[in-house]
Amino acid sequence: MARRRPANGRARWAAAATCALALALTACSAPASEPATAADRDWDDVLADAEGQTVRLWMYGGDDKGNAYVDDVLAPAAAELGVTLERVPIADTADAVNRVLSERQADVTDGEVDLVWINGENFATGQQAGAWLCGWTSMLPNMAYVDPDDPLVSTDFGRDVEGCEAPWHKAQFALVYDAARVEDPPGSVAELLTWIEANPGRFTYPAPPDFTGSVFVRQVLYEVSGGVDEVPLEFSQEAYEELTPELFETLQEIEPELWRGGETYPQDLGALDQLYADGQIDFTMTYGPATLPDLVADGTFPETTRVLLVEDGTIGNVSFLAIPATSGSRAGAMAVANLALSPEQQFQKARPEVWGQYTVLDPDLLPEEFGARFAELPQSEVLPPYAELSDGADPEVEAEWVTALDEGWRRQIAAG
């Protein structure tokens, strides 16, 4: 699937684009693969330097509620610190990584990207090439509300974050169905696969490398491999060759029973959601189930929409904010990342009508006032509480697994 680059690229980076792509894939001929490390500083000094800076946050532009949260809630709060926060919408996070790698190759020190909403393979690609500023998250005062022993915030798809990115919100993969059309919902991924074969044309998933389509493939990998404990989180070609034949055989077996006979797949989650909203399929899926009650309330999804509680849990992870080593507004970017971690911003972002994203803050570490406010967030019959939904959550495999599985899907499923 083609990936579009931002339309506002400058000619000075065009010559470096090919090398940047090679750098992303092989880390060859990198001018410097060691990460830039932020000097430990007093936080008041950081805020003083941040005042007057402009921070360009590159983030996926297809999430309307996420866009509105940044523009209408986070940016005004940043302005109170004297920082101008500009959201740069992109079609794919890889666009931001490629821009940073191009700037890194060209020895740019005041680049176009100051902050990136990122995780997984995109973070790993940049980290391998020394693209991120590291060692700065320990300076953020609001990290005091984050549990340092929580593996979801200390690792990113199996990779130690090494102070190179600050947690932003938690995600939990969820399968979603219409209870009016699915009277006896499956209770496990294995039962879902059986349901698909018994209900032709009523299920599909986005084509990887779409983020949600990719996680569905990984969830099936865990199932056909005998459970998460049977899949080594660290990637190896040996493990890939041992485990993926049954995965791709399973995906090939269900393909004729998918929407349109599996001849085509939705290109992204938005397309999948539209099929579900139109009643063409009975299931959708999401990494952000807290947004579902609002989608039901505004009539986008049917009122009988429900989250499927899956035996043995589903995959969970965290989204992060990373600062490129090429940013010229590092202090401003740190100030925004710290602001985004504040109890107030985390609470606002968790409200279903604002964005509906699960907080990365530990309830036991929060000030009493905010503990109560988070506890009073509205519950819905559409989905269970996060604690129940995330119970027994499956860990993410290393980012190298994601790349390999996406490529394997392209070769063995998309290519027929």
Image (cartoon, rainbow, N blue to C red):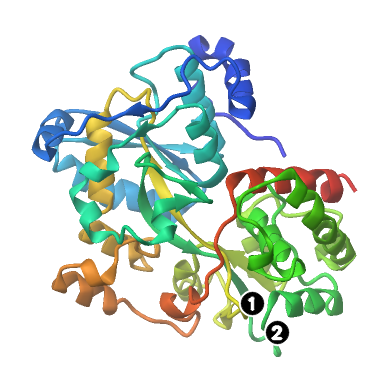
Name above or below for residue 185 compared with residue 207: below
Amino acid found under the numbered disc labelled 2: Val
Q: CA distance from mark 1 to mark 2?
A: 7 Å
Name above or below for residue 203 compared with residue 19: below
| Camera sees residue 271 | no
Q: Is residue 303 left or right of residue 340?
A: right
First of labels 1, 2 by sequence position: 1
Q: Nearer the viewer, residue 42 or 6?
A: 42
Is the Cβ of the residue at disc 1 closer than 8 Å to that at disc 2? yes
Q: Is residue 134 left or right of residue 5?
A: left
Q: Quadrant of the N terminus?
A: top right
Helix, strand or loop for disc 2: loop
**In percent of the image, x 22 and y 32: which residue is there?**
331
Amino acid found under the numbered disc labelled 1: Tyr
**Residue 185 image-quadrant placement:** bottom right
Q: Nearer the viewer, residue 46 or 174?
A: 46
Q: Which residue is denoted by mark 2 in the rendering?
A: 182
Residue 98: x, y in percent? 54, 27
Total count of labels:
2
**Residue 144 image-quadrant placement:** bottom left
Residue 49: x, y in percent? 14, 28
Q: Nearer the viewer, residue 386 or 268?
A: 386
Q: Which residue is denoted by mark 1 in the rendering?
A: 177
**In percent of the image, x 39 and y 28: which residue is there?**
113
Q: Nearer the viewer, residue 384 or 324?
A: 324
